[in-house]
Amino acid sequence: MPSVNDSTWEMHDFVSIHEGKVIGNIHYQVDRVTKNVSGLGIICFEDKPSVVFGRDVLQVVSDIFEKFHFHKLTCGVVTANPIMRTYDKLITKHGGRIVGIEKEDVLLIDGQYYDTKKYEILAKDWFDSKIKKCIAGG
């Protein structure tokens, strides 16, 4: 289990807890000069992510823009990860976009290189998606 970083200057690090048990870790790097966030890491310790963990992930992303007032979030996912389709939907639903795919971008513990899909969301697009949701009545 990863340790939680206690300094928030360069990184924000959270645990997700359900019924007194740590069920996941969510973290990202902070660039204080550009007010950008990168390297969003979402690690679920459950076999199947629960609704609680999903809510915690959305809360962390929401806080990036609404609580901490960062300008931009960039992140990625290994294309072999089955959660990628969910990320595609969530990113576009919340005003972000798919930037592209980087070939053989990461080396995993199996010794193989994998492609990563890159995403970004700007604060203004995040807020626009929330306004559209309110107008649509959702």
Image (cartoon, rainbow, N blue to C red):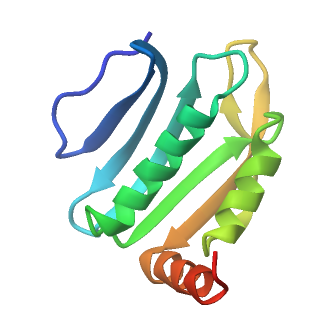
Residue 92: % across, % down: 70, 69
Q: Residue at x 35, y 57 (%)?
A: 63
Left or right relative to 51: residue 114: right
**Residue 98 visible at all:** no
Residue 120 lies in quadrant: bottom right
Residue that appears at 74% across and 15% down: 111
**Residue 115 visible in the displayed image:** yes
Residue 119 is left or right of residue 7, and the answer is right
Residue 98 appears left or right of 69: right
Residue at the image point whose x is 33% and y is 68% from the top: 66
Is 126 drawn above or below residue 5 in the view shown? below
Image label count: 0
- Across and down, in percent, residue 64 comes to 36, 59
Image height of 51 relative to 58, above or below:
above
Residue located farthest toward the front when viewing the structure as drawn: 137
Closer to the camera in the image, 9 or 103: 9
Q: Quadrant of the C terminus?
A: bottom right
Q: Quadrant for residue 5, please give it.
A: top left
- Where is residue 89 drawn, in percent x and y? 76, 60
Front in this rendered view, residue 91 or 31: 91
Q: Quadrant of the N terminus?
A: top left
Kindly indicate the quadrant of the structure image that contains residue 134. bottom right
In this rendering, the answer to whether 24 lies above or below 104 is above
- The residue closer to the viewer here, 124 or 133, is 133
Residue at 51% x, 37% y: name it: 41
